[in-house]
Amino acid sequence: MVPNGWERKPLEKVAEIKTGVAKGKKGLKDPIDVPYLRVANVQDGHIDLSEVKTIQIERHQLERYSLQVGDVLMTEGGDFDKLGRGDVWQGQIAPCLNQNHVFAVRPNKQVLLPYFLAALSGSSYGKTYFLSCAKRSTNLASINSTQLKEFPVLLPPLPEQRKIAKILSTWDKAISTTEKLIETSKQQKKALMQQLLTGKKRLVNPETGKAFEGEWEETTVGAVASLTAGGTPSTKHAEYWGGNIPWMNSGEINLKQIYSVEGRITALGLSKSSTKEIPQNSVLIALAGQGKTRGTVAINRIPLCTNQSIAAIMPDKEKLCADFLYFNLDSRYKELRSMSTGDGGRGGLNLSILKAVKLLTPKLNEQQKIASVLTAADKEIEVLETKLAHFKHEKKALMQQLLTGKRRVKVDEMEVA
């Protein structure tokens, strides 16, 4: 049902759909290099201009293919969740073209506002349509210009479109501001780690009210901690699985702070395999794993067992603070990966390598103070990320109501006029 006072029309009736320029054309006459937008530039709700490449076209075609302010850019394909994603072009670069895998939709602004169309296409309503007619393969989907032209656009009166777009833009600003705060906080934490974990910046000792003093000691992980690797109970024995003992696989190390894991093994599974019980607040490192997993560091906040692709480092509590070690090794991800044996993606770390990793450590009370400061920085980032998730959830719910007319907005008489 179309809401009272609204219309529904195919996109081609209320907008011009312009396809982009294909790469690799040869024999061009009077060619010129022009910036152009690829699929990677067109994100869901924003245009990423961090890397803009150029393409050659014939000079006389420049006006025909150039983007105009107010064009709505949409991708023809990609991952399921990226289908039809896009945003409004604001003329950030002029001239600028779009690749043939990116559609430029030019709305008739007498009946359809660009920001309303961008919101509608990116909403559940739009994505449901695009997925219903998309050509699918493993994890990928694509639409063609014919399907895009048939997209059934819901058309409230212009003042209502304007009001809806204004409401959603307020949420977009809140989301954008929070994302920038998160990025700033992460950069600040990174700089803080570089200073605190190397002794370039000394914190105030709460016992003396003065900055910590004294030389830091150079040691190795193996000299101040014990290490062990995990194991996996045989999956051929059902009685080894489904018990009460948490068991962690290497993929879960990306959680960083481990408060819960999916796997469970029985006491029999523990006794019949090489896995071991790891006390809480041990530092975990992925010895192997696909992609970027190898070298990733986490800390377990619960006792658990792990598979054989994870090493556990259990600090000597009189010499080494577990959280200090966690932050130290977490800041050295690239260094740890470079220590891997083997070649390419098949390389791995082992206990001997980890035992030899060098550490520069202050006295225990300074380690604890450094860890508490960095933990506070993590908490700040966590609060912002929770806030961001809330904003995105609220905006998504609001979009579903406003863009389909389930919830109507009040429009002032002056706006109608």
Image (cartoon, rainbow, N blue to C red):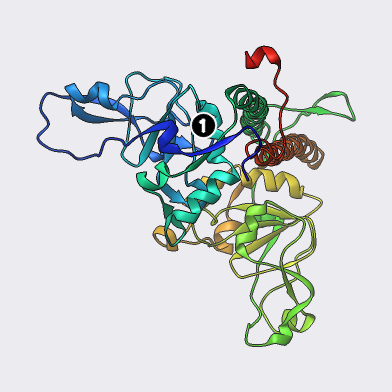
Q: Position of residue 312 (x, y in %)?
A: 68, 61
On screen, residue 218 versus residue 16, left or right, reads: right
Residue furthest to the front? 4
The image shows residue 76, relative to residue 339, as above or below, that is: above
Q: Residues within 10 Å of mark 1 (few under 14, many from 20)?
A: some
Q: Residue at x 70, y 41 (%)?
A: 397
Residue 361: tell me if it is visible. Answer: no
For mark 1, give the secondary structure: strand
Which residue is under mark 1?
Answer: 46
Taking depth in this image into account, of 384 and 267 the one nearest to the observer is 384
Q: Position of residue 417 (x, y in %)?
A: 62, 13
Residue 139: tell me if it is visible. Answer: yes
State the image quarter where residue 233 is shown. Answer: bottom right
The image shows residue 171, relative to residue 304, as above or below, that is: above
On screen, residue 258 versus residue 207, left or right, reads: left
Amino acid found under the numbered disc labelled 1: His
Taking depth in this image into account, of 79 and 385 the one nearest to the observer is 79
Q: Residue at x 39, y 60 (%)?
A: 343
